[in-house]
Amino acid sequence: MSTSTDHGRPDPEATSPAANSDGRPVSDRGDTVCVIGAGASGLTAIKNLREHGFGVDCYERETGVGGAWNWRHDRSPVYASTHLISSKPFTQFPDFPMPDSWPDYPHHGQVLSYFERYADHFDLRSHIWFGTEVIRVQPVEGDRWDVTTRSTGGYGPERTARYAAVVIANGHNWSPKLPRYEGLEQFRGEVMHASSYKDPAQLRGKRVLVVGAGNTGCDIAVEAAQQASRCWHSTRRGYWYAPKYVLGRPADQVNDTLLALRVPLRVRQWLYHWTLRLTVGDLTRFGLPKPDHRVYETHPIANSQLVYYVGHGGIGPVPDVARFHPYAVELADGREIDPEVVVFATGYLPRFEFLDASVFGDSAGAGRPTLWLNAFTPGHPTLAVAGLLQPDSGLFTLSHWQTVLFARLLRARRDRPERAAAFASRVRERAGERYSGPVKESSRHWFEVGHADYLRAVQRALTELEGK
Amino acid sequence: MSELRIMRGREWSRPVRPARREVLSAIPELEEGRPPLLFVPGFGHGAWAFAEHWLGHAASRGFPAYAVSLRGHGGSEPAPEATLRAYAHDVVQVAASLPRQAVLVGHGAGALVVAHALARYPARGAVLVAPVFGGWGLLGAALRRNPAGTLPAVFGGPLRLNRRQLFSSELPDEEARRYVGRLGRAGRRAQWALLGAPEAEPAVGAPPVLVLGSPDDRVVPASTLTRVARRYGSAPLLFPGMGHDLMVDVRWAEPIDAILDWLEKEPAAH
């Protein structure tokens, strides 16, 4: 298909001088699709839309690709030792494998170079406007979108361009979620969120309390065990700490052998408990609390070292924090400890500050939109969110298929409108569907999906869209 | 063709074991923005078959040209138990390591490997040269022409092709003997796959596909060329008088020039 302009900056003096509701000029970009963000999900959106014949303008607030995985970016949550927690086959884009020479669990620097090579290989950079942030996305008639941008940091004039469709891929691991604690303001020690933790040198020789047992919290606790003079690790509940290797193979690959056979959840849970008993053993012996749930009911934690360091005395497991005193922290069981540094590895919340929350059915503005397949918005057939998922494996594969589905939906809108209309009604019916077994209710699990359940749902959606 | 498959449980849980690969290349002196070509030799052949003439010729016309030896072939790591999936993995790995989106060119059974690789890598285009897609008819033809070389392969032994199958009579004896002497063998399981391989999944990214061969090929009958080409919505380009190994036959320049001309004209391949 032909697009009016494949290259070139959206130009306010463009051919059709429209004006938006505020009376400002809008340049019409025809069939072009706007992608917000050039991280993992944004890059695969550009590639797949281009592959399906669409023109793409991508806006990226930073000056490089890679989003969260680019440690130079001020919104990047990675720290020096970040490694993948899903092995290569689950992590790579399904049509651009990571090199055979890389380890099972690549380092974040390798992940960034993977995205840079992906961008160069498919010539994506010429479609990305770096150093440009999106400040407003507004629906206009005909299911089109007015996207207003300006230079990152608020310099320069605002420009508005009209697009046929929008893919939101702004990431959801950059806006820290900080729990409230009584007395935190009076605490005299250093307090940081994991997002500002970059290097173990920040902990060296200090007494450190790490709050939160996500994968980040566990990683930081392990680093503190090696660097700090003392480390406490506070968790809300007991968790299952899965090793990264089982039977000499990456644990997720072993797990998927069962998934491929469609072994029922209960049986898999039983097998998993049994495997963990053989490999990790009884955690309460180490002073860790007994998990109050079965495996697969919380986001999986893949960390072989945590239990090891607990056993070596490097990490002291402690319960939830009750309140802060100026020079001490009171725990839920009444004990008091005296850390110098407190690291909150308490996660992130998604934010879509450029979009009216009601578009998403998130009228409370809490950052939890109501979507189908975590991607499609009822009533807005030309809007998709990419990568708003917390999978039990790698994310990039899932983003890839989300954007393939969206590209094919846009193609169907042109070639087979009746199919696209049927898709839209399915979006309305099924918005809010979950793709995991029962999980503990927590904002941590808002976007939790099981990769097999989720991808089967995407496969069905694709078949329904294109099947005979 | 079968449907796009998202669930790949077996590939996730049992990824192909890496193997050291030989990649030969010829790079033009001036970067002209042309897509790189990746040549995939058929069973028994190594990257050397393309290094003889085609790599250099493609580079002289401005196309960066690479040839990979599938595992167990040429200078790559020995792999007696290699499968078709492992071969496709090798091709996708090399393609993804190239600086830009590549055109895959498969010869003989290498064309079948390319067809499978296309389902795992969005190539800019694909060329199937004298494609061996397997089947009982192919086996029958091979048994008729070369029973002694073919029969052992049915029972897992090596497939021994002779010079009458591979080259036209124009090729000087000495050269033909030299090439036949360099032939290796494919893995037993991959050989068997020729008799009952599951059909390749649809290509991702809808690349343009060119099929070419010779009506006088003694391995691939002309009817096969037509059938394969029809599958990709085109007709085969024919080079009468040439043998199966078009890239080393006397008139090797004609098919490679046709491929490069096609790439220059094909809009989707830019």
Image (cartoon, rainbow, N blue to C red):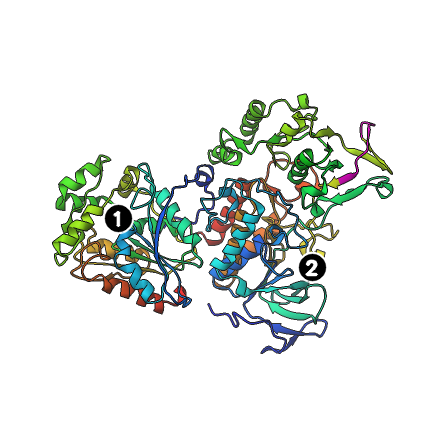
Query: Image quadrant of residue B175?
Result: bottom left
Residue A251 spot, x, y in % from top left: 53, 33
The residue that mark 1 highlights is: B45
Quarter of the C terminus of chain B within the rendering: bottom left
- A152 within the magenta span: no
> How many numbered discs sit on the rendered protein?
2
As helix, strand or loop, the secondary structure at mark 1 comes to loop
Amino acid type, label 2:
Leu
User: In percent of the image, x 24 and y 43: which residue is there?
Assistant: B184
- A340 within the magenta span: yes
**Residue B86 seen in the figure:** yes
Q: Residues within 10 Å of mark 1 (few under 14, many from 20)?
A: many
Q: Quick one: A265 or A44, which is closer to the camera?
A: A44
Q: Is residue B206 above or below residue A162?
A: above
- Horizontally, residue A140 falls left or right of residue B169, namely right
Q: Is residue A170 above or below residue B254?
A: above
User: In percent of the image, x 49 and y 30: which residue is there?
Assistant: A248
The residue that mark 2 highlights is: A355
Q: CA distance from mark 1 to mark 2?
A: 58 Å
Residue B153 spot, x, y in % from top left: 21, 38
Kindly indicate whether the residues beneath marks 1 and 2 are on one polypeptide chain: no
* Chain bearing mark 1: B
Q: Quick one: B83 or B224, which is closer to the camera?
A: B83
Which span of residues is magenta-colored?
A: A332-342
Q: Which mark is residue A241?
A: none
Residue B223 spot, x, y in % from top left: 21, 55
Q: Is residue B252 above or below residue B40?
A: below
- Horizontally, residue A42 falls left or right of residue B180, namely right
**Residue A468 seen in the figure:** no
Residue A265 spot, x, y in % from top left: 55, 31
